[in-house]
Each structure stands twice: as C-alpha cells, then as structure tokens.
Image (spheres, rainbow, N blue to C red):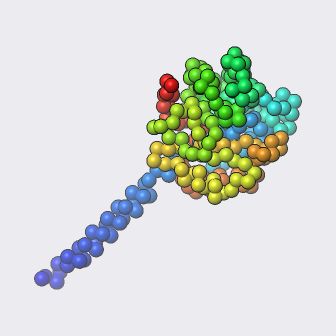
Amino acid sequence: MNPATPSLCMRLRIFLVFLLCLINLDAEKKDPGTVVLTFDDSVASQANYVAPLLKKYGFGATFFITEGFDFAKDKKNYMTWDQIKKLHADGFEIGNHTRRHIVVGRQKLEQLTADVEYIEKQCEKHGIPRPVSFCYPAYQTTERAVKLLRQRGYRYARTGGAKAYDPEKDDPLLMPQAFDGKPKSTLEQFKEAVAKAGDGKIAVMTFHGVPDVQHPWVNTDPKKFEAYMKHLRDSGCRVIALRDLKFAKPSEK
C-alpha cells in the first residue's frame, strides 16, 4: 500500500469527525422555541418595573387590561389609562381582560358582552387598537364565552393549565399557559416551562404584579422575575406578544 494513501481506518475517522461536526452545527441552528409573556390585572408595577425591563431585553409581551378590583380608585397599585397607552406606544400588546374581572360562567351573555365591549371602547378612546387577544378572568371558560370571542374577531384567548400551546391541536381561543408566576414559583420551574417551547409548541407564561401588593397570592418578587428574564435571554428563545404568533383560525366547535 502506498504510504501516502490514508488507511481505511483513518478515512473512517475523518468521516466520523465530519459527521459529528455536521450534527453539532445542526444542533446549533435548532430553533430554541417561542415564548409568550402575558401580564394580567392592570397592576401598576407592570408599567413601572416590568415594561422597562422587557424593553432592556428586547422582549415583546401582552398586557391584559381590566378595570376590575380597585382600578378606579387605587392609582398607586393599578395603572392609569395613560400608562396603558404608553405600553402600547412602547410596542407592547394591549389585551382584553373584561371590565369587571368577573368569571364568565357567572355572567349572562349580555353582561359578558358589555364587559368585553367596554375594554374595546376604552382602547379606541385612548388610541389603542381593538384587542385581538383575551384572558379569561380566573382562567375559567365556557362554550358561550368562546363563541362570543370568535364572533367579535378575537384570535387568541388564554386560560390556565401547565402545558405548552400546540397550534396543531389546541384551539387558540382556549390557549393553555405553561407557567403561572406565584410567590413559591422557582427558577427551575420557569426553566422547565421554557423547555416546553420548540417543535412547533409555544410556552405561554402568566404573571400578575411584579410585585403585586393587592393580590399577594399571585405576587412575583422583582429579583426573581429578573432571574426569569435573564434565563430567557440566555436561552435564545423568541419572546413575543400573543398577537405576533402565526394566526391559526379557531375551530368552529
């Protein structure tokens, strides 16, 4: 054999190294997934703390607005419409969380319609586009509510749960959440939720106030929240608002 000719073993080694390089390159190119950030209840800390932090990282988000609770009187703990308008001006999505934050199953159709329509009109009044995303108060749904949202042109509606949203299987008007920020939530739990994104699935994250003084059972500590956001940055995930998802037509069920 000519000494200058590589042996079969050597050629196999070269081929294997080349193959491993291709595999690693493919892994590097793999889409890390899409994460949607959502914030409920019009809490003032969302404007004062959350929004500036999201802008720092270049993240999108949906803020679900309600005039329930003490929105009208407590402007220390709840946003003003000027603050909500600024969220829109800063590029964030404004979603509908109903006027009074009443569980939809406890309302007559005309009451629910009025509560949904009220937030739409408030958005129009303040130069904010009519919402296309909705959040069910207390995460509870009814077939009647889903039908109403479909008739009014809503594209997405978030519920509760603890799984990724699969556009191939899930109705976008019954969209599950992958994570629900609470006082005892941990960074590891958040990482597990982020890991559910990918392969076409979307991890929808739910938060309330950061902090949430009026509703401590859904409070998220600001330092903990920043750790969550740093992980999102490091993960390379695409972090967007609900409206920015590829729209899938709701089922007609």
* Residue at (74, 28) in percent of width and height: 102
Q: Tell me the quadrant of the picture where the N terminus can be found.
A: bottom left
Q: Where residue 193 sits: x, y (%)? A: 59, 51
Q: Where residue 159 sits: x, y (%)? A: 63, 36
Tell which residue pokes out farthest to the top in this image: 110
Q: Where residue 24 sits: x, y (%)? A: 40, 62
**Residue sitting nearer the eye, 148 or 198:** 148
* Residue at (67, 28) in percent of width and height: 96
Tell which residue pokes out farthest to the left in this image: 1
* Residue at (69, 21) in percent of width and height: 112
Query: For residue 176, what is the image quadrant?
Result: top right
62 left or right, relative to 32: right
Q: Where residue 91 sits: x, y (%)? A: 63, 36
111 left or right, relative to 7: right
Query: For residue 85, what is the image quadrant?
Result: top right
**Residue sitting nearer the eye, 6 or 170:** 170
192 left or right, relative to 247: right
* Residue at (81, 32) in percent of width and height: 69
One can see residue 39 in this view = yes
Number of marks in picture: 0
Say above or below: 134 vs 203. above
One can see residue 94 in this view = no
